Amino acid sequence: MAALSSAIASAAKPFSLPQTRRARVAALHFPKPHFKKKEFNFDEVSLSLRSLPRLRVSSNDAHFNSRSEESQQPQPSFAEFITSERVKVVSMLALALALCNADRVVMSVAIVPLSLANGWSRAFAGIVQSSFLWGYLASPIVGGMLVDNYGGKVVMAWGVALWSLATFLTPWAAQTSLLALLVVRAMLGAAEGVALPSMNNMVARWFPKTERSRAVGISMAGFQLGCAIGLTLSPILMSQGGIFSPFVIFGLSGFLWVLVWLSATSSTPDRSPQISKYELEYILNRRQTSFPVETSKSKKVKVVPPFRRLLSKLPTWSLIIANAMHSWGFFIVLSWMPIYFSSVYRVDLRHAAWFSAVPWAVMAIMNYLAGLWSDMMIQSGMSVTLTRKIMQTIGFVGPGLCLIGLATAKSPSVGSAWLTLAFGLKSFSHSGFLVNLQEIAPQYSGVLHGISNTAGTLAAIIGTVGAGFFVELVGSFPGFLLLTSFLYFLAALFYCLFSTGERVNFDDPAVI
């Protein structure tokens, strides 16, 4: 019985071959593929991913890569910088901005004889003067969109051609009808609205971040010198050739500039036939450290920029408020300081050469020095964000303190010294918010400049008109200067709290 049970149990067990035979059978019927066993290596995958083209580079990666690239290529000397192709481009930009401001201020000189000849009142003369701002109010936004889509070279050429035509036609318009004069002045303002966005776009394309403040300083130096040139030469030209001679000469100068600009400059460094190989490599290497590296399949900037997302970021509002305060202070000084010195110090400034030239010349010189210092700070390792905040603080707190000194000055000589110092310190803001527009959104720098410039125009209108009402209600012009000083301090604080020198993501709606 036990033997029978053992036989049944052994029959019930599954059939199994011995270990050696089982291996032989498997090798005979199921040949084992000869694959070499290999473990998954994350380091190799990471290395292969690094070799793929990168569409965007974070600020930290760009900063790290910039150190290694910049150590391989030395900084150009001063002689190499001055004789470079990019300085030729920025010099042409400075000339364009000089013409821009000169064409703008000619009317402030010619308005006196025009008012006498046509019997205009002061209020009506103010309407003629303000017609420039009608066209200038919204054109920076449209101009910024055009710059972002077509580039600064083309848009700047069209802008200079149109505002030169408007300047050249001003004598004809003044002799034809009042409506024609107002339309031509508005056309001048609309055309000049593209100047600063175009300048910003060309500087971003031609200059690395370590030279961008210097480039903006040179450009804005031309802008300030244009005011000094217009105020100084216009009376001389009028005395020699009549009331309308400055309009004709400055208009023809603009047409000449357009011809040189189109024939002697390129929209980007890689399209320039005159640029040296060394300079091209220097610009492209340095520019890649501050801008995203894009492949040929990367998306182009949208025709309609994301205005809602642009306005949803605090860095954008820091630029808007900074530009508004900058324009407020600029136009207050430009429009009311002659009347202030005349009413407070009883000084006739029509023949005071220092007022028409010295403050603007000081501001032009300080523009370059501030830009040079800003670039040196970045080259020494200081962050872009801290550098911009330092420049903007000097550019706002400095003029605020100078206006307090001007309001308490007892003599015109002391007051003029405070005013000149305010102009010089104000130029530091050009190495603050004005350069910052290119850094937080290079693909939308034109539109951002247009938005902030429109806010600045509104602030200029409110400040210029509000100064008159304030003086009438309060009876104190120094009181308005103290109010402006307080606004300077608030704007500096807001910029320091919410600005950044890093790129802001405006394209992803999920990023707050």
Image (cartoon, rainbow, N blue to C red):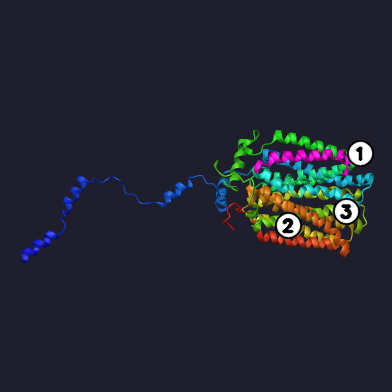
The mark lying in front, picked from 2 and 1, is 1
Residue 336 in picture, x, y percent from top left: 86, 55
Q: Nearer the viewer, residue 377 or 157?
A: 157
Amino acid type, callout 1:
Gly
Question: Magenta residues?
Answer: 149-178
Tell me the CA gap for discs 2 and 1: 43 Å
Tag shown at residue 242 = 1
Tag shown at residue 23 = none
Residue highlighted by disc 3 = 338
Tell me the CA gap for discs 2 and 3: 25 Å
Quadrant of res 80: top right
Residue 66 in picture, x, y percent from top left: 57, 48
Q: Are marks 3 and 1 in contact (CB under 8 Å)?
A: no
User: In what quadrant of the picture does the N terminus appear?
Assistant: bottom left
Residue 99 in picture, x, y percent from top left: 79, 42
Residue positioned most to the bottom: 1
Residue 505 in picture, x, y percent from top left: 59, 53
Tag shown at residue 394 = 2
Q: Which one is earlier in the sequence, the residue at label 2 or at label 3?
A: 3
Badge 2 marks a residue whose secondary structure is helix
